[in-house]
Image (cartoon, rainbow, N blue to C red):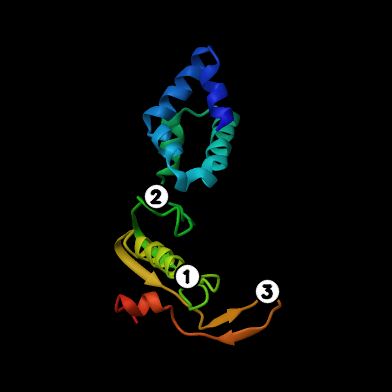
Amino acid sequence: MTLLVEWGDRRDDQAVTFYEELLATGLAEALDRVALAGEVSESTRMEMLMRRWSLSVEDFARRTLSQDRVEVITTTSSKGLEFDVVLLVGADDNLMPSYLCKTTEAFDEDRRKFYVSITRARTDLQIFYSGFATARSGRSWEVGVSRYVREVGLA
């Protein structure tokens, strides 16, 4: 965030134009949201790539809308986006919901992320699960499909 503010404080035309274009795309509102606090570094990386390749905001957006690519994103970052096909992997109990969920609020948050993920598909949703969970130690055990998949009647 500091880097973007510094760009905006510079007085050369290119920096001011870049900063204004970012603000026009809704960046100011996005940065105000607490949920995106961890993704500010992603904005910084994007800005550095744009500078390295001398891309305008429009050029960058045009390249990212290419139809011949696969986008891998997290359940959290899928909010507000839409795709023709969504492949949701890791729909196993102990992963979805996470084994770290200990409170009702944590389970509810994981459920919301799951719901957001499955509603991103325009035409095709495919959900995958392995049937196994593996600890960091390497020990594996059998688990079923996520309770969230069952709750929405998809298993």
Residue at 49% across, 13% down: 13
Q: Position of residue 18 (x, y in %)?
A: 47, 23
Quarter holding the N terminus is top right
Pair 1/2: label in front: 1
Cα separation, mark 3 vs mark 2, equals 37 Å
> In this figure, which residue is indicated by the disc labeled 2?
67
Q: Give SS at disc 3.
A: loop
Q: Residues within 10 Å of mark 1 (few under 14, many from 20)?
A: few
Q: Amino acid at mark 3?
A: Arg
Q: Quadrant of residue 136?
A: bottom right
> In this figure, which residue is indicated by the disc labeled 1?
103
Which of pointers 3 and 2 lies earlier in the amino acid sequence? 2
Q: Position of residue 122 (x, y in %)?
A: 28, 59
Q: Amino acid at mark 1?
A: Thr
Q: Residue furthest bottom?
A: 142
Q: Is residue 87 above or below residue 47?
A: below
Q: Is 25 left, or right, of 101 in this rendering?
A: left
Q: Nearer the viewer, residue 44 or 111?
A: 111
Q: Residues within 10 Å of mark 3 (few under 14, many from 20)?
A: few
Cα separation, mark 1 vs mark 2, equals 41 Å
Q: Are marks 3 and 1 in contact (CB under 8 Å)?
A: no
Q: Position of residue 114 (x, y in %)?
A: 39, 66
> In this figure, which residue is indicated by the disc labeled 3?
136
Q: Is residue 26 above or below residue 93?
A: above
Q: Give SS at disc 2.
A: loop
